[in-house]
Amino acid sequence: MLSALKQIFSPSPIKHQAYDTYVKLVEQSRQPVFYRELQVEDSIDGRFDIIVLHIFLVLTRCEQGASAQASEFAKFVSEAFFADMDRSLREMGVSDTGVSIRIKKMAQAYYGRMSAYKEAVHDETALAEALKRNVYRERDVPPQVIASLASYANRNERAIAGQPLEAILSGDVKFSS
């Protein structure tokens, strides 16, 4: 009976590790290089898009692992993201009704970007187009800046793919610059 109660009230270790990983992804997403040199708009939308890009990079590695543990970890990383978005909206004073509407729109954007990046990740030109559409939202940004973000994403997709899945699942994700 006690073990059943522990399972109900204690988060699983993988959930805790996924949350820790999400925090690292947010920290990486807040690096000034994205907002200064790579000209991502330093706004709610810009930050949303850079976080989603980093989540994509980690979830892609989890898919390569093709294990139940990796799938559960990926699910918990996504849950941490949406819980963070919910919290942020509430802190900004959005009402309960408004939060649910905005989270629904964020979910559509999140899954749309995941799909676009998955299709384009191994083609830097296609990835640059997806980034222009999503991260830059068709703003007039020099093509070389967009290409630099696409190069960063491809470089990190390869770097994370080369990291042991066990390290990723324990929250030890390393990004290249």
Image (spheres, helix red, strand yellow):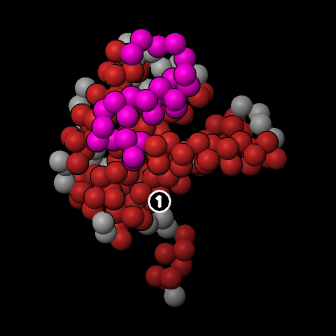
Q: Which residue is mark 1?
A: 75
Residue at the spot 52% in from the left edge and 29% down from the top edge: 133
Quarter location, residue 145: top left
Q: Which residues are magenta?
A: 117-143
Outermost residue toward the bottom? 1
> Which is more toward the observer, 159 or 89?
159
Number of numbered discs visible in the structure rendering: 1
Q: Residue at x 49, y 75 (%)?
A: 7
In this rendering, position of residue 40 left or right of residue 166:
right
Queried whether the magenta region covers residue 157, the answer comes back as no
Residue 121 part of the magenta segment: yes
Q: Residue at x 79, y 42 (%)?
A: 98
In x, y percent, where is residue 91? 69, 35
- Which image quarter holds the C terminus? top left
Image spot of residue 60 (x, y percent): 34, 51
Element assignment for label 1: helix
Nearer to me, 170 or 135: 135
Front residue of 142/50: it is: 142
Residue in view at x 37 percent, y 41 percent:
120
Q: Nearer the viewer, residue 116 or 11?
A: 116
Residue 86 in sight here = no
Amino acid type of the residue tagged 1 in the rendering: Lys
- Answer few, some or many: residues within 10 Å of disc 1's Cα (few below 14, many 20 plus, some between 14 and 19): some
x then y, percent, for residue 111: 53, 49
